[in-house]
Image: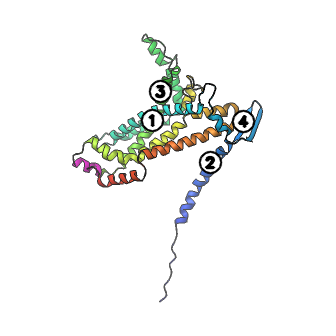
């Protein structure tokens, strides 16, 4: 008796077909510009008045210039990296703590807070406002003739130059970033907590675990992948900080360039002399810093092989 071979239908090719548009967009909109940036960073290419200089291949000269101390003995790329990181940390740390607290409160089975959809909408709304609008609002509020100073003088105090102080200016920038993004972070953390198997919390409650034990032994370890994602994306956004300090400080990073960020530094080369070589070199440095710090965060928060095994073990055993 002859056996008939049945033709099997392979659907694997359709998966490749469906992801082709993504790779086409990625190649033309991300990969090619990225490679072009690396390429341009090795050229002298800028405008002096109406004269176009270059493009002339100069090797690593742009990078050497960036890391050469100025007349004051400062390496500006280091100073502006420090400014960027300080303002990011001032906003990111309170944002993470506050968002985590809100996420735990709203998802708590014991509290059973009603109207969660309403609260989710309200806390997410600042994220819908343009950063430039927030910057203009706070610039108006804290200017020397703004409402805040008017209230201070009405109470018998003296005018405070909020944008003339290093830490007040940095604090305002950090607070704006905190206000804009804490809602988005809260939603992500709430989604992560609701994705944890509820039977683990029930088992912990039966075993008599306290809320603190449940948080540190179940919630936090199993929420770690979401936390790592939130921190890394926040880090990437922080290193690209531009619009808020640009508007508040009129693009000069006052006082004394202590609020000048890496992207503001890059923008100065593009807007004044169209220096594509130096701006390309700064972009490459920002790319490297982002990659290194993201890897440090990923490894330091236990997301290696041992961290993944530990998370799986917690999910399997719960609290003991």
Q: CA distance from mark 2 to mark 1?
A: 29 Å
Specify start and end residues of the magenta stretch as a single range. 199-208
Q: Which callout, 1 or 4, points to the residue nearer the camera?
A: 4
Nearest to N terminus: mark 4 or mark 2: 2
Residue 42 falls inside the magenta stretch: no
First-in-chain label (1 vs 4) = 4
Counting residues from the start of the chain, the first of labels 2 and 1 encountered is 2
**202 in the magenta segment:** yes
Report if the CB atoms under discs 4 and 2 are less than 8 Å apart: no
- Secondary structure at badge 2 equals helix
**Of circles 2 and 1, which is in front?**
1
Q: Which residue was labeled with disc 4?
A: 46
Residue 96, x across and y down, in percent: 41, 37
Disc 3 and disc 2: Cα gap in Å?
A: 35 Å
For disc 2, the marked residue is 29
* 3D distance between C-alphas at marks 1 and 3: 12 Å
Q: CA distance from mark 1 to mark 4?
A: 36 Å
Residue 272 drawn at (x, y percent): 68, 30
Disc 1 target residue: 92
Dots 1 and 4: beta carbons under 8 Å?
no
- Tell me if mark 3 has few (under 14), some (14-19) or many (20+) residues whose alpha carbon lies within 10 angstroms of its own: some
Residue with the most extreme bottom position: 1
Q: Secondary structure at mark 3?
A: helix
Quarter residue 213 falls in:
top left
Q: Is 121 on the left or on the right of 104, as rendered?
A: right
Element on which disc 1 rests: helix
Q: Which mark sits nearer the N-terminus, 3 or 2?
A: 2
Q: How is the image coloured?
A: rainbow
Whether residue 318 sits left or right of residue 180 in the image: it is: left
User: Can you say whether 152 is above or below 11 in the image?
Assistant: above
Residue tagged 3: 171
Q: Mark 2 and mark 1 in contact? Answer it, CB < 8 Å.
A: no
């Amino acid at each position: 008796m002859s056996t008939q071979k049945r033709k099997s239908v392979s659907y694997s090719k359709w998966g490749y077909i469906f992801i082709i548009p993504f790779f086409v967009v990625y190649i033309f909109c991300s990969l090619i510009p990225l490679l072009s940036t690396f390429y341009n960073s090795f050229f002298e290419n800028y405008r002096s008045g109406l004269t176009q200089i270059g493009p002339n291949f100069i090797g690593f000269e742009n990078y050497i210039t960036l890391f050469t101390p100025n007349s004051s003995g400062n390496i500006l790329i280091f100073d502006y990296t420090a400014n960027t990181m300080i303002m990011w940390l001032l906003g990111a740390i309170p944002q993470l703590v506050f968002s985590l607290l809100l996420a735990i409160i709203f998802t708590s089975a014991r509290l059973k807070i009603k109207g969660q959809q309403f609260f989710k909408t309200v806390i997410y709304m600042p994220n819908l406002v343009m950063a430039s609008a927030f910057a203009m609002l706070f610039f108006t509020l804290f200017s020397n003739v703004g409402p805040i100073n008017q209230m201070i003088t009405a109470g018998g105090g003296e005018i405070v130059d909020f944008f003339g102080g290093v830490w007040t200016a940095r604090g305002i920038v950090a607070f704006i970033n905190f206000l804009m993004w804490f809602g988005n972070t809260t939603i992500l953390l709430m989604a992560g907590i609701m994705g944890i198997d509820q039977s683990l919390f029930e088992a912990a409650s039966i075993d008599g675990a306290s809320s603190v034990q449940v948080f540190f032994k179940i919630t936090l370890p199993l929420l770690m992948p979401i936390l790592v994602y939130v921190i890394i994306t926040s880090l990437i956004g922080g290193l690209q900080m531009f619009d808020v300090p640009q508007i508040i400080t009129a693009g000069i990073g006052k006082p004394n360039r202590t609020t000048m960020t890496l992207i503001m530094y890059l923008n100065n080369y593009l807007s004044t002399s169209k220096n594509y070589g130096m701006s390309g070199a700064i972009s490459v440095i920002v790319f490297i810093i982002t990659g290194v710090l993201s890897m440090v965060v990923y490894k330091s928060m236990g997301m290696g092989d041992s961290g993944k095994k530990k998370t799986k073990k917690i999910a399997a055993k719960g609290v003991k």
